[in-house]
């Protein structure tokens, strides 16, 4: 459960990850040390998992985004598959899903030739992968790392 001040802090940190303790404190109506302590408690509770720069994939040379649905032949192949996924830098996200597929991957590549190489050399050679279905993103209307934060109190 999040307190109102925790919710306010999280919303601001998701928008401005580099906000100073002083600015965060002013936003929360606290002192800078109290604001810092509140954030440290959110980190200790695992609510804040870490911090990262938001990189524009196109500007970084990876303009192609694709979603790849993966089907494994047997459930006992999951651990090896997930280990392989963790080692492939092109995979931005991996989700275990319900339905006809086992996993849905969000993949970033330099272009279609790079995607083709990735699928053939990296993904389809992974033991247990029996089928993939790839959808190439033409444009993105919304992409966010923000999590909806509700106030409990």
Image: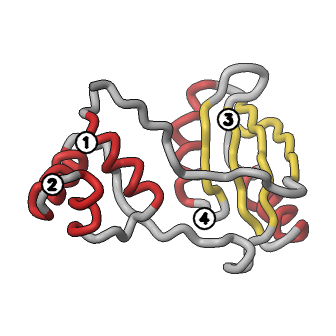
- Look at mark 1 in the image and give the residue it sits on: 5
Q: Secondary structure at mark 1?
A: helix
Q: Nearer the viewer, residue 68 or 81?
A: 68
Q: Are marks 2 and 1 in contact (CB under 8 Å)?
A: yes
Q: Residue at x 36, y 30 (%)?
A: 151
Q: Earlier in the sequence, mark 1 or mark 3?
A: 1
Q: Find numbered disc 3 in the image and state the secondary structure of the residue it sits on.
A: strand
Label 2, label 1: how far apart the Cα atoms are? 9 Å
State the CA–CA distance, disc 2 to disc 3: 44 Å
Mark 4 to mark 1 CA distance (whole Å): 36 Å
Label drawn at residue 103: 3
Q: Identify which residue, 5 or 94, lies in the foreground.
A: 5
The numbered mark, 2 or 3, whose residue comes first in the sequence reads 2
Instruction: Kindly identify which numbered label has been placed on residue 30.
Output: 2
Q: Which mark is residue 89?
A: 4
- Left or right, 18 with respect to 4, comes to right
Which mark lies nearer to you, 4 or 1?
1
Q: Are marks 2 and 4 in contact (CB under 8 Å)?
A: no
- Position of 17 relative to 143 (above/below): below
Query: Percent x, y for residue 147?
Result: 49, 42
Disc 2/disc 4 C-alpha distance (Å):
41 Å
């Amino acid at each position: 459960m999040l307190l109102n001040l925790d919710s306010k802090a999280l919303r601001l940190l998701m928008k401005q990850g580099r906000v100073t303790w002083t600015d965060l404190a002013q936003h929360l109506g606290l002192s800078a040390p109290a604001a810092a302590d509140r954030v440290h408690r959110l980190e200790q509770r695992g609510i804040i998992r870490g911090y990262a720069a938001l990189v524009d994939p196109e500007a970084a040379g990876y303009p192609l985004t694709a979603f790849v649905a993966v089907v494994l032949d047997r459930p006992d192949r999951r651990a090896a598959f997930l280990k392989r996924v963790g080692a492939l830098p092109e995979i931005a996200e991996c989700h275990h899903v319900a339905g006809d597929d086992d996993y849905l991957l969000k993949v970033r590549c330099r272009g279609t030739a790079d995607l083709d190489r990735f699928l053939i050399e990296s993904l389809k050679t992974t033991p247990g992968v029996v089928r993939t279905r790839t959808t190439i993103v033409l444009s993105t209307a919304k992409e966010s790392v923000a999590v909806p934060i509700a106030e409990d109190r």
